[in-house]
Image (cartoon, rainbow, N blue to C red):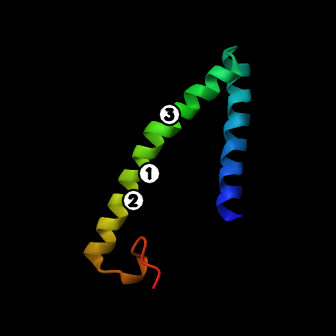
Amino acid sequence: FLDTSKQAIGMLFIHFANVYLSDLTEEDPCSLYLINFLLDATLGMLLIYVGIRAVSSIVEWQQWESLRFGEYG
């Protein structure tokens, strides 16, 4: 439920952002959705990857055993 609700909230946010931006720019909401989706699927994933690698490096450096990714005891 938590993962699904997170995705639904994200999709709702993108939907309302597209509707708002389409009113401001007089663009087609579908084209804005495609642009937002492509940016999220490329730059967003790259940003998440870099963030996880940075946090993982800090966790390893500080030797915080309870904060390691994928280690569930």
Q: CA distance from mark 1 to mark 2?
A: 6 Å
| Disc 2 residue type (three-letter) | Ile
How many marks can you see? 3
Where residue 47 appears, x then y in whole percent? 41, 47
Q: Residue at x 71, y 35 (%)?
A: 15
Q: Earlier in the sequence, mark 3 or mark 1?
A: 3
| Disc 1 residue type (three-letter) | Ile
Name the residue that disc number 2 marks: 52
Label 3 secondary element: helix
Q: CA distance from mark 3 to mark 1?
A: 13 Å
Q: Do the residues under discs 1 and 2 have CB atoms within 8 angstroms?
A: yes
Q: Residue at x 45, y 37 (%)?
A: 42
Q: Furthest residue to the left?
A: 61
Task: Residue 57: name its quadrant.
Answer: bottom left
Label 1 secondary element: helix
Where residue 31 appears, x then y in whole percent? 63, 20
Where residue 21 appears, x then y in whole percent? 67, 25
Q: Do the residues under discs 2 and 3 have CB atoms within 8 angstroms?
A: no
Name the residue that disc number 1 marks: 48
32 up-or-down from 46: above or below: above
Disc ID at residue 39: 3
* Apparent side of residue 21 relative to residue 53 in the rendered image (left or right): right
Q: CA distance from mark 2 to mark 3?
A: 19 Å
Q: Earlier in the sequence, mark 2 or mark 3?
A: 3
Task: Residue 11: name its quadrant.
Answer: top right
Q: Residue at x 56, y 26 (%)?
A: 35
| Disc 3 residue type (three-letter) | Leu
* Apparent side of residue 52 relative to residue 35 in the rendered image (left or right): left
8 up-or-down from 43: above or below: below
Label 2 secondary element: helix
Q: Residues within 10 Å of mark 3 (few under 14, many from 20)?
A: few
66 up-or-down from 59: above or below: below
